[in-house]
Image (cartoon, rainbow, N blue to C red):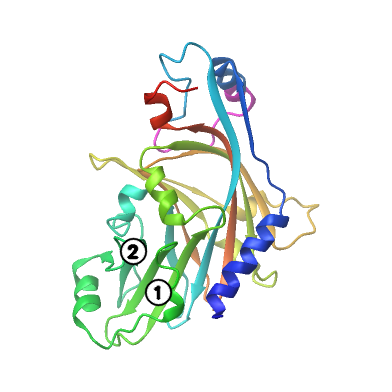
Amino acid sequence: MNKLQRRLNELEQRAARMSSFEANYEHDAANHYEHADKAQAPIMNPSGSILKAPSGYGGTGRVDAAQFDLNVTRINTNFNGVLPYALFAPMHARQAYANFITPPAGWSLVVMGGSDWNGGVGNAAALGIYALNTDIVIPDAIRQVLNTSLVFAYIKNDDVTKIDYVVVSCNQVAYNAFLAANMVDVFNMSKIRYQISDSAQTVQFQQKLVVTSESIFGKLDRQSLSVGAYKSPGQFQTDIIDVNGSFDSDKETALVSNIIKVNNFTSTFSIFVSRFDKHNRLEMGQK
């Protein structure tokens, strides 16, 4: 079994041991949102789309509370520095997050993943390099996860045999299926439990999380968050930080960050969901 697959299996096992919750319950949605908003005002919401009780819901709705885990793993360290990646915002994933992340100078980015993305998407130069140069070989370890993960492939322009990968996966469902659902389903995150695979690499926590949103009309908003500021003085764990706040995830809004230069290093984001809006369920009049 290759190293990447072993790493993904380890992450799934670790996630099962981490504290999580999942519950479905019914109550008055309007009262729930009113009380939640008073208890904790959003600190980040670039898209301005905090979920409210949907009209026509008769005052009663179904609210889902859940938790899921996203893993971000770096494979190879040809580039001497951090590499950017983005989570969520499926509308922009299909454009290789063009206005969200910038490849390092002298490198091109191709985003791959899913049955319809195996050819990759990215800027014209990167696509040309990827499609036309026979020297580029995608390792089997990467090919094996393409249908379930999103892969950021950074290709050195003057030596295309050097490629670094950032692989995003989800423990609960295939991440590409998650992105497809995120095109219509929106949710509010109340907390992110941020864990690193190597407790000696706490420098990863110096990389900011940037909530970035771009509307279909081109309006771009960014709000950055310093992860280290959330570490409590009395906290003894060096490999976990709980980032408390409230912000939305939808097709336009991404969580952008960087991953440090350590091969097979993984950042795991355990996302706690406080509110969830399934558009298809609402349209069918289901509670």
**In front of the other: 249 or 200:** 249
Q: Main secondary structure of the magenta part?
A: loop
Q: Quadrant of residue 86?
A: bottom left
Using a 10 Å C-alpha cutoff, classify the residue at mark 1 as few (fewer than 14 neighbours), some (14 to 19) or many (20 or more). Answer: some
Q: Secondary structure at mark 1?
A: helix
Q: Which residue is mark 2?
A: 102
Residue drawn at 28 percent across, 67 percent down: 120
Residue drawn at 68 percent across, 46 percent down: 20
Number of numbered discs overlaid on the protein picture: 2
Q: Which residue is mark 1?
A: 143
Residue 255 point in image, percent of width and height: 46, 51
Q: Secondary structure at mark 2?
A: loop
Judged by depth in the image, the label closer to the viewer, 2 or 1, is: 1
Label 2, label 1: how many angstroms apart (C-alpha)?
24 Å
Q: Is residue 154 above or below residue 181?
A: below
Lower position in the chain sequence, tag 2 or tag 1: 2
Labels 2 and 1 touching (C-beta < 8 A) = no
Residue drawn at 46 percent across, 78 percent down: 141
Residue 214 point in image, percent of width and height: 32, 44
Query: In the current view of this chain or complex, which residue is farthest to the top?
Result: 58
Task: Give, as a three-letter code, the residue at label 1.
Answer: Arg
- The magenta span reads 36-48
Residue 128 point in image, percent of width and height: 19, 75
